[in-house]
Amino acid sequence: MIDTGDTAWVLISAALVFIMTPGLAFFYGGMVRSKNVLTTIMQSFFIVAMISVEWVLIGYTMTFGADINGFIGSLDKLGLAGVGLNVLENGTIPELAFVAFQCMFAVITPALITGAFAERMKFAAFAVFILLWAVFIYNPMAHWVWGGGFLAELGALDFAGGLVIHILSGVSGLTLCILLGKRKGYGHTAMIPHNLPMTVLGATLLWFGWFGFNAGSALGANALAANAFVTSQAAAAAATVSWVLAEWKFNGKPTILGAASGCVAGLVAITPAAGFVAPLPSVIIGLVGGVVCFFAVAVLKEKLGYDDALDAFGVHGIGGTWGAVATGLWATTEINPDGANGLLFGETHLFTAQLVSIVVAYALAIAGTYVLYKIVAALMETRASEAEELTGLDIVEHGERGYARSVMTGSPMLGSFEDSSEMLANTVMSINAQKG
């Protein structure tokens, strides 16, 4: 029978997860230059609409339809046929509540990718690529892990999306930014965030919504939801502290951008483990996640030279990988009887299943993104020209400006500050180069 308390919690959690994607728009939007702020926000906002339609029409049935050989869901629920007001199998909520909750997961996952190719992909190519990615990469992976597919049969655990959401989006983002190439001037011109208060607002909305993301995955107002809530908070807080301390030691100053990035890194790391581990391990997962993701952003990206503009891979790809490994270490049936015991509780099967699942997620993200990008590139122009990049995609792609122009000077009110900041940063870079 339907439990009204469980149903209310899942619907509230769906709303919390919904606010994460507009929150991500602010988080990413503040980190780009002012001439690309609307483009960046538009990408996340448009994904909310486009993928919601895709989910109702075909996404849900591909993910949670009757399993076909462990590979994909059947089309028995195409267009949500037969779903109606039925109770979710083995659950206490209407299946439509589950549809709504999972829809928000399907929405935010491709939105995370946009941080990797920010400031250089044309909107039409972006829209076609994201739609194809949702259908041919996200839906199959979600089925393999959550819909009864072969990774679920293998024993892999992913409470709220470390494998399905963060590794998949982070690695796909890395692949796509390499295929598109670097932004004009990358490595020579300072590309500093134009509005850090906006980024902090976005990070706060993400942190807030993440309670629905993780605790909502218990699919009920119960003890497991409470555990996921506490482990999420503990990991996010620990990672914020460890990222800031690592940055302070490595760069000499603690920054608000580092604190915001750290909290997201901790939330990413705990996501696959939130409903399987106790609070104390969640602190360790967060502490390690903050440091690992910081060095992925501060050192790995510079060493390898790829232009992951807003660190989608460094935070989500690396953080999700660590979280999946950590699940295999600290998961315990004392927290979740439907889970398994990890390596630190004397069993090896789960840890092995997690490693196999990580390899599968990386392989699907890399190969799938490469193939889909090549298809889209054969059909249309994918990359903005140098002139268009210089002008900014807000004007070129959407014919709008993020900020009003000054009547007196005709210059963007915030753009002038950004230009001055970039000039100053470029001057410092030039001086340092001459000293070197």
Image (tube, rainbow, N blue to C red):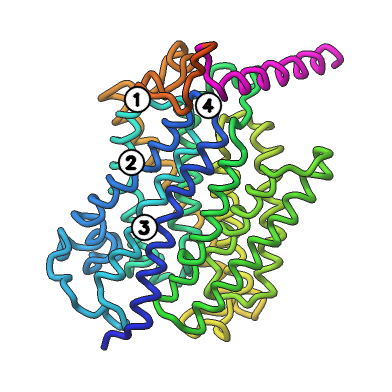
Amino acid carrying mark 2 in the image: Phe
- Label ID, residue 34: 4
C-alpha separation, residue under disc 3 versus residue under disc 4 = 28 Å
Amino acid carrying mark 3 in the image: Met
- Which residue is located at x 67 percent, y 31 percent? 302
- Single out the mark in the foreground, 3 or 4: 4
Say above or below: 41 vs 359. Answer: above
Q: Which residue is mark 2?
A: 46
C-alpha separation, residue under disc 2 versus residue under disc 1 = 13 Å
Amino acid carrying mark 4 in the image: Ser
C-alpha separation, residue under disc 4 versus residue under disc 1 = 14 Å
Q: Earlier in the sequence, mark 4 or mark 1?
A: 4
Which structural element holds mark 1?
A: helix
- Residue 164 vs residue 420, the one in the foreground: 420
| Badge 2 density bin: few <14, some 14–19, many ≥20, Cα 10 Å | some
Residue 403 seen in render: yes
- Label ID, residue 104: 3
Residues shaded magenta:
410-436
Say above or below: 375 vs 23. Answer: above
- Which residue is located at x 29 percent, y 42 percent? 131
